[in-house]
Image: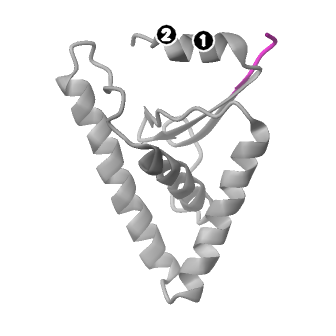
């Protein structure tokens, strides 16, 4: 799969890269700061607690997060099918959706609704620059 110039620059200039996958599809948002990833993880845990506080059961939250993930992942897949390059087009997910992708995935992993494995979850790559 072709890599954008922007991603090449990130790959070549960052010691820390964090990718979040769902069903083998990577979120376009790549984190280059470990503290930011930990903050998103903490925010996901807070999201779960707030959901419970407002009357949303664990099962309901899991269902909602998975439904949202399905929509976002399908948007990425559909965008890739339309693209001449065969990759999702830039901007197919907005900043809010990419943030939600990360939050939902951390929540689903925390709630043990999905495994952090080769197809789903967090992939961290570190290297010397």
For this rendering, which residue is in front, 100 or 120? 100
Q: Residues within 10 Å of mark 1 (few under 14, many from 20)?
A: few
Give the number of the disc on residue 21: none
Circles 1 and 2, Cβ within 8 Å, touching? The answer is yes
Image quadrant assignment for residue 25: top left
Whether residue 105 is situated above or below residue 119 in the rendered picture: below
For this rendering, which residue is in front, 56 or 109? 56
Q: In terms of secondary structure, where does tag 1 sit?
A: helix
Quadrant for the N terminus in the image: top left
**Left or right position of 25 against 87:** right
Q: What residue is shown with label 1?
A: 9
Rounded to the nearest angstrom, the CA distance separating label 1 from label 2 is 6 Å
Q: Which residue lies furthest to the right in this view?
A: 128
Main SS, magenta residues:
loop
**Left or right position of 91 against 33:** left
Image quadrant assignment for residue 19: top right
Whether residue 18 is situated above or below residue 99 in the rendered picture: above
Residue drawn at 69 percent across, 30 percent down: 32
Q: What residue is shown with label 2?
A: 5
Q: Position of residue 44 (x, y in %)?
A: 62, 62
Q: In terms of secondary structure, where does tag 2 sit?
A: helix
Quadrant for the C terminus in the image: top right
Residue drawn at 42 percent across, 49 percent down: 97
Q: Where is residue 100 in the image (x, y as percent from the top left)?
A: 48, 54
**Left or right position of 71 against 40:** left
For this rendering, which residue is in front, 80 or 96? 96
Read off the magenta span: 125-129
């Amino acid at each position: 799969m072709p890599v954008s110039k922007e991603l090449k620059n990130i790959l070549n200039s960052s010691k820390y890269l964090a990718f979040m996958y769902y069903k083998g599809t990577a979120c376009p948002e790549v984190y280059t700061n470990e503290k930011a990833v930990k903050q998103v993880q903490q925010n996901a845990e807070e999201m779960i607690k707030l959901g419970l506080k407002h009357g949303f059961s664990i099962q309901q939250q899991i269902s909602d997060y998975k439904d949202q993930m399905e929509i976002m992942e399908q948007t990425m897949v559909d965008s890739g099918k339309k693209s001449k390059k065969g990759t999702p087009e830039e901007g197919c997910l907005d900043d809010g959706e990419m943030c939600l992708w990360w939050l939902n995935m951390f929540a689903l992993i925390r709630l043990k609704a999905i495994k952090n494995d080769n197809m789903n979850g967090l992939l961290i790559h570190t290297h010397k620059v």
